[in-house]
Image (cartoon, rainbow, N blue to C red):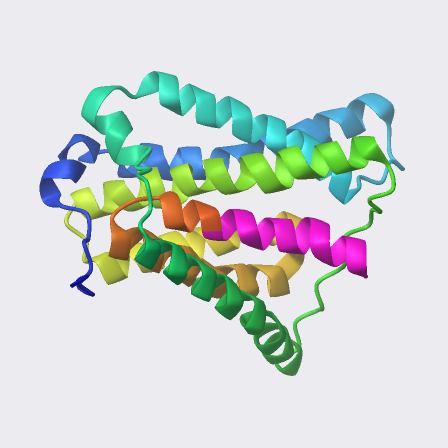
Amino acid sequence: MATLHPRLPTAESLRPLEGRVLESAVLALLPVVLTSAAFAAHAVLVGPGREYTAVDASLVYGAALAVVGAGLYIRLSGAARRAVFAFDRPDGRELAATLAAFVVGILLFPVVTAAAEVVGLPPMGGFDYALSDPVTVAIVVVGSVVLAPLVEEVLFRGYLLGALLARGLHPAVAGAVVVVLFGAMHIVSLGPTGVLFTAVWGVLPTALRLYFDDLTSAWLLHLLNNAYAYVLVVALF
């Protein structure tokens, strides 16, 4: 009979990440910093007046994620790399939990955005692109559906969460730190309401990563969520 007990990361598997909290936090936020710096440099070069779209952001942020993710993979080796890139083949229970979390995430959106409106936060803007152009589709899919879920999960729930746990933080405390930083880094792209929703939603992949002791379910959930938000919702509405 399948057990319902969580697997949880072990101290032995996380030992290679001891002393890496600061580095992991910097790397988790680095793609956003690089993206903002690229847009600032471009604005200086071409002058004011250029409005950047969600497609521009997907292209530049995707490139930043690819560079940081590849650099991290090259930098780490052996047990440290296995601890950070902690992907494993999911079983049926893990896949079922991922699908359930995906549904919960969809249901959370109207609840959180309504709560944000009650406290006076501005509404999240819609995505300012259509999927009629193949180049736009390619940029959005590669940047926001393929690279963002994969690399963000590695950086936040692979490296940062692992380093916090290796330092001895309780899983709930380490998870809360990751959720807050994960939400905060969306301030530029999604605004304060987006930060609130992303932080609340971020509890789901964080719980999956801790419960199943791998990144696969967190990554699959993130991929499904971004495909739904960046492609399906835009195509339908």
User: Residue 91 magenta-drawn?
Assistant: no
Left or right, 19 with respect to 50, comes to left
For this orientation, the residue located farthest to the top is 74
x 52%, y 67%: residue: 103
The x, y position of residue 58, in whole percent, is 68, 37
The x, y position of residue 120, in whole percent, is 66, 77
Q: Which residues are magenta?
A: 221-237
x 64%, y 83%: residue: 118
For this orientation, the residue located farthest to the front is 1
User: Residue 235 magenta-drawn?
Assistant: yes
For this orientation, the residue located farthest to the left is 12
Please give the count of numbered marks on the rendered protein. Answer: 0
The x, y position of residue 59, in whole percent, is 69, 31
Which residue occupies the foreground of this view, 82 or 53?
Answer: 82
Whether residue 204 is situated above or below residue 54 in the rendered picture:
below
Query: Could you tell me what secondary structure mostly forms the magenta stretch?
Result: helix
Work out whether residue 185 can be spotted: no
Work out whether residue 45 can be spotted: yes
Res. 7 image quadrant: bottom left
Which residue occupies the foreground of this view, 235 or 167?
Answer: 235
Res. 81 image quadrant: top left
x 33%, y 46%: residue: 90
Whether residue 207 is situated above or below residue 82 in the rendered picture:
below
Left or right, 99 with respect to 124, comes to left
Left or right, 96 with respect to 60, comes to left
Q: Quadrant of the N terminus?
A: bottom left
Q: Quadrant of the C terminus?
A: bottom right
x 19%, y 53%: residue: 8
The x, y position of residue 187, in whole percent, is 60, 53
